[in-house]
Structures are given as structure tokens and as C-alpha cells.
Image (cartoon, rainbow, N blue to C red):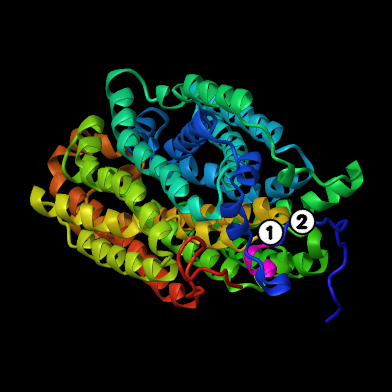
Amino acid sequence: MAEPQGQSPAVEAPYSTKDRLEKDGTDPETENRDSGEAVDAEYPQGISLVLIVAAVVLAIFLISLDQTILGTAIPKITDQFGGLDKVSWYGSAYFMTFGGFQPALGKIYRYSDLKITFLVSFFIFELGSLLCGVAPNSSTLIVGRAIAGVGGAGMATGAFTIIAFSAEPKRRPLLTGLVGSAYGLSAVSGPLIGGAFSEKVSWRWCFYVNLPVGGFSALLILLFFHSPKAAKPIQAGWRERTLNVDPIGVILTMSLIICFILAFEYGGQSRAWDSSVVIGLLVGFVAILVTLLIYEYYQGERAMFVWRLFKKRSLWAPAAYIFFLAGSYFVLLYYLPIYFQSIKGSNPVGSGVRNLPMVITFSIAAIFAGAFIQRTGLATQTMIVGAAIATIGAGLIYSWGIDTPAGKWIGYQILAAFGYVIPYLVPMNIAQANADAKDMSTVTATLFLFQTLGGAFCVSAAESAFVNTIIKKLATTAPDLNPMVVVATGATSIREAFPDHLDGVLQAYMAGLKTTFSISIGTVGFATLLALFSPWERLHGSPEAVGFA
């Protein structure tokens, strides 16, 4: 096969630690320790660093909040806009653009000022949030979610790139853990805020809340962060920049995601699985995937998926791992509130409270996980142990039923959350620790792409399995009811809508939920196996750290 074409202009970039050791026997980290002035000149210090990290934490908090706050709000949204059949789109529309635009925005960061690109992404995210807040129907809400996803993609890549350029490699795991705690903070506050807004004010405030908090975070970055010399944009004309953003690759990726989501939304619900539409979408998914892989190979450095980087285990193994780990986590994140509100009869606020054991554990353990990685450098080992614990936790959650006591649903959530959080940002640590400065935004975007694609694909598959199982189960538990009417009824309304058939409806709902929990178990279990392929050398900052390929 011919070699890929379309190489971008060569750029001289700082050597990675491993490159320097092999080239001249020097360790840049040792040089930095010997010369504090050099480090101070490169990295922000004191209050500036604190405020930059705070701004990044807020940014990650917001884009993560957009993924968690809807869990308890979705039942109320379905009550207003109708039906369960759009539930997957409320999440998947965000995941679709968040993932589809990640690599493109990673490239844009290479050719544009880091600070300006981050702030523009922030504006797009805020615009999408505003549109969601004023949405008069589900279609407008979905469009707003898609726009917010584009901005969130740029914010995510920029946030972790800013951290990478604001701290020495040995300190990054701890700061990444602090930033990662924002995921937990959003998980703690997301269900509660979503539930409180939905119950006491309006679900629309789930999106309005992004505006003032986002404005404050953007202001901090504007005032205190200055793009470092190492992040200097590559000089190129507009034509070269456009080609390197890979617009065709973006279109193919978006088409890939849409085909998958539509196939699982239609299959078994509005259309039979063997219908020409569903089969066509699945065939289209495979065809687009093959086309994308071939096209990307020949694009070389201009590709969204740079094959030069994917030849390294430090990228492809963590990327595959986070795809399945994140997919499993987001399935639970979306369907645990439905369990509490439909099976347990909780209101949105009560559902958020019952989610606290999982999300509080996630928040607290994230910081300790970052400190542990910084101290020991045991990255792959943490990935294996974490995913294994998460698999056990998800398996125990599968055992839940209609009458499960509080002790079990509290304890099982804590175990699962601990398993998910301790390895959640380790793939990012591994990829960034082995990337040159010129590739930092690209590998960051790649990890976020696989993380969000995992969420989009798994949530869509879970939604299809959930609805199809309910339809099938109702034939035996409540044969007098029209399954499509039950599916079209919001999760919080089933007690009022079907009081005479409530037991049968709850049994069908529980069967559907168990199917989604099965998907969560399978995906995180597979992630455990994928972790074995990740590099076993320790990360930078540990006594034995020398980098790895």
C-alpha cells in the first residue's frame, strides 16, 4: 500500500523525555530541577496557576454538567415534549458533535492561538446552552445540544491542553486529577440541580445555569492565561489550515454516528429490525467506517486520526480503553435516574439524592486517584484494577429489582463509582506523557473523541435495548396495554397513566433497565481486557519513569 500523502509543514517541536534520553543522555526534567528559573519562565506560578486551574475546572465542570444534569431532568422533558423515543437524542446529539468535532478542533488548536480558540469554543458552548434553554420543542432542544457539543469539544481539548502547558510533566497527574474531580462535582451537583430545577422551577434552568458560570471561567482565562511559546501556532495559509482540519473526515465521522444512532432508534420501535431502512443504516454505518479508515490513512498528517500517533501503544490502547469505560459509565449515568423515578417512584430531587452515593464517591476518589498516579506512576495497573472493580459494581447493580432495599443500592453505587473513577483520566495521562508539544492538542482531542463516541454509541444501544425490552415484556406482564402508548409516556407519569396495570408496567420497566445494565457490564468488562495492552512502564514523575512508546 502506498504511503500516506498530504503531510503538513514540518515543525520543530521540543523533544519528549524519552527522545532526549535517547538522543543525548539528558533528562529535561532533571535540567528543570537544576534550573528553577527555566521552569518559572515556562509555567505559570502562584496565584496565576491557581486561577488558571480554577477556570479549567469550571470549564470541565460545565461540559460534564451538560452530560449529568439531564439524567434527572429527562423524565420531566419527556413529560412536556412527549415520549421516551427521543431520550437518546438528548444525550447523543451532544455526544455526536462533541466527539465528531474533537479531532478537527484539536487540529485548529495547532494552527490558532490556544487562548483565543478556547474562548471562541466557550462562546459556542454558551450559545448552544441558551438555545436549549429557550427551546419550544424537542427538535430545537436537540439542535441546541448539538451546538453546545461543538463548543464543548473545543473547551475539553483546550482545557486539558492548557493544563499540559501549565505544569511540569511530573505534576500533571495531580492537576489532571483536580480537573477530573470536576466530573465528580458535576455528577454530585448535576442530578441534584437538574432535579431541583425540574421540580421547583423548570428544566430549562439546567441550561441557563451555564451562562453566568461559563462567563466567569472565560474571564479568568482571558485575564490570567497567556499562551506559552511551546504552544505557538503553526504558520500556514488558510488553504493549508482548512485541509489540515480535515473537513471530509469530520463529515464522515458525523455521518457514521448518525447512521448508528438512527439505526438503533428505529430498530424494533418505529421500524422492524429487518426493514430496509434499518438494514440500510447499518450497512451505511459499516460502509462509512471503511471509507473513513481508508481516507484517513491516505491523508497522513492532515488526517483526524494521525496514523503516526496510532502506531504507539500509548495512544491506541488508552483510546480503546476509554471508549468502553466511558460508554459503560454513561449508560449507568443516564438510566439510574430512570430506575429511581420509575421503579422507586422518586421525584427528580429525590432521584438526585439517591444518586449521591455514586457521584460523591466519584468526586472524592478522583482527586486521590490523581495523587496516587503522580506518586507511583502505576498507570496500566490502575486501569486494570479500576475497570475490574467497576465490572463487579455494575454486575451488582444488575441485581437490583423492584423491591431492592436502600443498603444495596447505596453500597453498590459506591463500589461501581470507585471502580470507574480511579482509571477514568489515566488514559489521558498516558497519552499526554508521551506526546511532543506539537501533538499535545491532537492526542488530547483523540482521547476525548473516543470517550465521547463510547458514550454516544453505548447510550444509543442502551436506549434501543431498553425500549425494545419494554415492548416485548409488556406482551406478558400487561397484555391489555398498547406497548407504544406506554413507551410514549414519560417515566414519571406511568403511575398516574396506568394505575390498574402498574405492576405489569413496572416489571417491564425493570426488565428494560436490566438490559441496559447488562450493556454496562459487558462494555466495562471488555475495557478490563483492553487495559492489558496498555504500556506497563511508569509515568513521568515516578522513580522509574522514562516514558514509553
Task: State the residue at coordinates (41%, 67%).
Answer: 378
Task: State the residue at coordinates (66%, 63%).
Answer: 284
**Relative height, residue 35 to residue 316 (above, below):** above
- SS at badge 1: loop
Instruction: Confirm whether residue 487 shows in the render.
Output: yes
Circle 1 residue: 436
Mark 1 surroundings: few (<14), some (14-19) or many (≥20) residues within 10 A? some
- Front position in the image: 215 or 12: 12
Circle 2 residue: 13
Q: Where's residue 239, x and y in %?
A: 91, 46
Q: Where's residue 172, x and y in %?
A: 50, 51
**Relative height, residue 5 to residue 451 (above, below):** below
Q: CA distance from mark 2 to mark 1?
A: 7 Å
Does 18 appear in magenta? yes
Instruction: Confirm whether residue 405 shows in the render.
Output: no
- Front position in the image: 476 or 132: 132
- SS at badge 2: loop
Residue 450: name its quadrant. Answer: bottom right
